[in-house]
Image (cartoon, grey):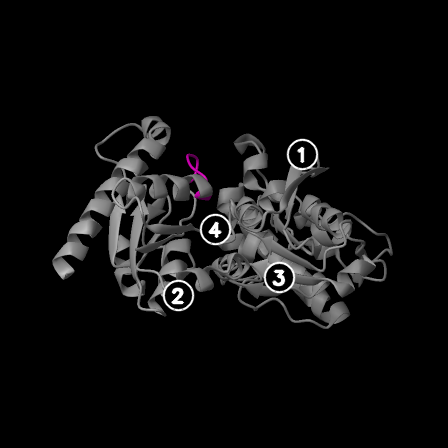
């Protein structure tokens, strides 16, 4: 029997590697002689850097940058095993978790730290940078990121200024003459699974502004400012980014990366599948096990379990998902290549207990799934 284990992390309890190790342990109690290949996965969000560093025997590099409120924070990026590719989670520099709830106000939060993180990755001579852009605290269209890399934003008076989100309507001219030269020889890919445009009711400000602390009136001003920003990008960079799907991701950072770094958007799960060479490993598998912390109605939209399942179905391999829990809407994954879904929580318990017992519950569920699979194989014979 050949088994491929390719799960995402269980948020706040187990890394993707820990999940894969625990499922392997459970299956080995039933199939001790099985050939088991573990491929920890991610979908471009939290945990992607660690997953790809682990998968390629790369290095995790910690660096100080300016956070969303311009305070110093300790961010990180991954240098993959090829020594030519860096992977960045913008949230490590500009994430919402770095701003206390009482201080959340996207008028003032900035992506400057993400730009500094990109610059520090370039110091390692990489030829490619992959940037995951989920979980931001910002709504500045990536202007702070661009500022950190040398772009100047000029007022009508001719004065350069720091591009906070509430000031983007004051941009008269954009000067890219001092943009970090290394960008031109570096491929930038953005792992992005949302399709929101930069502006409008489905744009960055109205859809994501509230969770970052914006009031309704602030959302309107932020949206107007991003519209002005988009027009100035069109005028001076000759790029139309306002309505491109994904340009509204991470408070418009998607638009900024497309405009200033000529970045291309790709699905996060596709990046991880490619880097980990998952397809080669599952071609002759008998069974694929995947999973994530919770399977729900959002899982079909770019999340790890469905990305893994679709690839497995290309080779006719059956797929079982083991999740921490599943909620209403989870059944949609049955139309996406997943054959069965199991939850690890055996009984009602407080969240803290769920997190503490995550590994034990996952192990016991894996044993039970393995026993069920053994029955199925015996009956098939």
Whether 105 is drawn above or below 350: the answer is below
- Which numbered circle lies on residue 271? none
Q: Mark 4 or mark 2, which has the lower sequence index?
A: 4
Residue nearest the viewer, comparing 258 with 279: 279
Give the Cα distance between marks 1 and 4: 24 Å
Please name the residue that numbered disc 3 is placed on: 189
Residue 91 seen in the current view: yes
Q: Does the segment drawn in magenta span residue 14?
A: yes
Mark 3 or mark 4, which is nearer the start of the sequence? 4
Question: Pointer 4: what residue?
Answer: 42
Secondary structure under tag 2 reads: loop
Which corner quadrant holds the C terminus?
bottom left
At mark 1, the secondary structure is strand
Q: Quadrant of the N terminus?
A: bottom left
Coordinates of residue 59 in the picture (x, y in percent): 64, 43
Q: Magenta part of the protein: which range?
A: 10-16
| Residue on which disc 1 sits | 73
- Density class for disc 3 (Cα within 10 Å; few <14, some 14-19, many ≥20) is many
Is residue 284 found left or right of 232 in the rendered image?
left
| Cβ atoms at labels 4 and 3 below 8 Å apart | no
| Secondary structure of the residue carrying numbered label 3 | strand
Tell me where residue 30 appears, x and y as whole percent: 25, 43
> Badge 2 is on which residue?
283
């Amino acid at each position: 029997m050949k088994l491929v284990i390719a799960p995402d992390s269980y948020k706040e309890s187990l890394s993707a590697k820990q999940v894969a190790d625990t499922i392997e342990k459970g299956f080995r109690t039933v199939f001790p002689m099985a050939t088991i290949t573990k491929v920890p996965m991610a979908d471009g969000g939290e945990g992607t850097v660690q997953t790809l560093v682990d998968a390629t025997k790369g290095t995790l590099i910690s660096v100080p940058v300016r956070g969303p409120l311009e305070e110093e924070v300790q961010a990180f990026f991954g240098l993959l095993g090829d020594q030519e590719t860096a992977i960045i989670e913008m949230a490590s520099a500009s994430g919402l978790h770095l701003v206390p709830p009482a201080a959340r106000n996207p008028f003032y939060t900035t992506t400057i730290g993400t730009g500094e993180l990109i610059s520090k990755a370039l110091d390692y001579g990489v030829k490619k940078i992959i940037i995951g852009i989920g979980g931001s605290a910002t709504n500045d269209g990536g202007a702070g990121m661009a500022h950190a890399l040398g772009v100047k934003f000029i007022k009508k008076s001719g004065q350069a200024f720091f591009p906070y989100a509430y000031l983007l309507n004051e941009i008269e001219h954009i000067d890219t003459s001092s943009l970090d030269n290394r960008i031109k020889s570096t491929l930038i890919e953005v792992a992005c699974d949302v399709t929101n445009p930069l502006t409008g009711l489905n744009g960055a400000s109205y859809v994501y502004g509230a969770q970052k602390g914006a009031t309704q009136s602030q959302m309107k001003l932020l949206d107007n400012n991003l519209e002005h920003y988009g027009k100035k990008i069109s005028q001076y960079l000759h790029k139309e980014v306002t309505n491109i799907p994904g340009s509204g991701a991470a408070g418009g950072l998607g638009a900024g990366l497309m405009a200033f770094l000529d970045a291309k958007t790709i699905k996060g799960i596709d990046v991880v599948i490619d880097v980990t060479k998952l397809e080669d490993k599952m071609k002759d598998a008998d069974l694929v096990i995947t999973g994530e912390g919770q399977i729900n109605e959002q899982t079909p939209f770019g999340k790890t379990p469905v990305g893994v399942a679709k690839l497995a179905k290309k080779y006719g391999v059956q797929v079982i998902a083991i999740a921490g829990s599943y909620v209403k809407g989870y059944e949609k994954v049955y139309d996406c290549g997943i054959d069965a879904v199991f939850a690890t929580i055996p009984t009602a318990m407080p969240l803290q207990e769920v997190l503490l017992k995550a590994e034990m519950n996952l192990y016991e569920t894996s044993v039970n799934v393995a026993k069920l699979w053994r029955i199925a194989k015996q009956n098939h014979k």
